[in-house]
Image: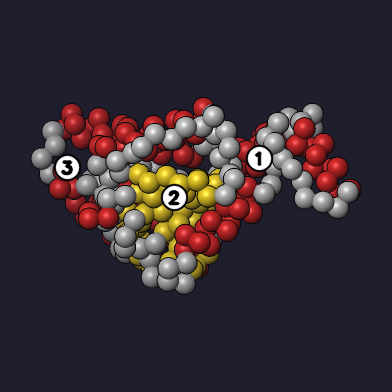
Amino acid sequence: MFDMPPYETLLTERVGGHILLVTMNRPEVLNAMNMQMGHETHDLLTRLHHDPDWVRCVVLTGAGRAFSAGGDLKVRNTQSIRDWTIQHEIGERSFELRIESPVPWIAAVNGICYAGGLEAALTCDFIYADRDAKFAQTECRIGIMPGGMGTQNLPRAVGERRAKELILSARPFSAQEAYEWGMVNQLCDAGTVVEQALAAAQRVADCAPLSVRQAKKSIHFGLQGDLHTGYRLELEAYYRLLDTEDRREGIAAFNEKRKADFKGR
C-alpha cells in the first residue's frame, strides 16, 4: 500500500479513489524550494515510482498566490558550493523521477511560476494554468542558468527559437502566451485551476491504469528518437497489455454497455 508520511513542506491529499493532490506549502516565500522540500519531493516521487498502488494521477499545485518562485535564493545566498551542489543534485533526481513517473502528473499553476518552479511544471505531463499566472525562466538574470531540464523541456514545449529568447533574456510571459504557444493545455478562471486539474485527473484515473502508464512511456521515450523506433516502442508497450485483466474487463464493459472496473492488473 502506498503510504504518505507527514511532510513539512508538502501537503498531500487523496481525492476520490485514485487521485493524489500535492501542494507545495511554503506560501510565505512563494513556495520557494529549499533543501527540506527537495528531500520531501524526492521521497514522494521515489515512493510513487516504486509502487504507485492506488494513485493513478497526481495534481501538483502551490499554496497561496504562487505555484513556485523557484529555488530559495535567501538560503542559497549563504550556501557553500558543496551544499548548493548537494541540494541541486536532489532536485535533479526529482525532475527525472517526475518525467519518468509511471503515473501522470498535472501541474495546476495558480500564480507565479518562475525558474525552478517553471521547470517543475514542465516536468509534469501537462499544465493547467490560472489566466493570471505568470511564467519566467529567470536564471540568466542572476548569473546561473536553468539546471532543472529547463533548456530541454521549454524548447520542446514552445519551440527552440522562442525558448532561446525566453531563457537568454529571462523575459516573463503570460498564461495566455503560454497557452497560445502550446505550453499550457487549459486556461482557467481565477480560483478554479485546481478544481479543473482535478477534473482532468479524474478523466485520466477513469481509464485503465496499465494502459495509461504504457501510453505515457511510449509517448515519452518514442519522441526521443526517429518515427520507426518510436513505433517499435509503441508496439512493445501495446502487446504487454493484451494478457491483462484490465484489457479483458475493458472489452467486456464496452460490449455490456457499462462502466469498466479497472484493477491495474
Visual colour scheme: secondary structure
Question: Mark 2 highlights which residue?
Answer: 60
Q: Secondary structure at mark 2?
A: strand
Quadrant of image for the N terminus: top right
Residue at 55% over, 34% down = 52
- 247 vs 219, nearest the viewer: 247
Can you see residue 181?
no
- The image position of residue 105, as x and y in percent, is 51, 46
Left or right: 171 in relation to 160: left
Sequence-wise first label, 2 or 3 = 2
Disc nearer the start of the sequence (3/1):
3
Q: Amino acid at mark 1?
A: Pro
**Residue at numbered disc 1:** 209
Position of 227 with respect to 239 (left or right) is left
Q: Residue 213: x, y in percent?
A: 62, 38
Helix, strand or loop at label 3? It is helix
Q: Is residue 190 left or right of residue 84?
A: right
Image x and y of residue 230, in percent: 66, 38
Is residue 250 something one can see in this rendering? yes
Q: Which residue is mark 3?
A: 76
- Near mark 1 (Cα within 10 A), the count class, few <14, some 14-19 or many ≥20, is many
> On screen, 239 above or below 181?
above
Give the foreground label among 3 and 1.
1
CA neighbours of label 3 inside 10 A, class few (<14), some (14 to 19), many (20+): some
Q: Of discs 2 and 3, which sits in the foreground? A: 2
40 w.r.t. 30: above or below: above
Looking at the image, which residue is at 44% across and 30% down? 46
Q: Assign a secondary structure to mark 1.
A: helix
Q: What is the CA distance from the residue labelled 2 to the residue labelled 3?
A: 24 Å
Which kind of residue does numbered mark 2 sit on? Answer: Leu
**Distance in Å between CA atoms under marks 2 and 1:** 19 Å
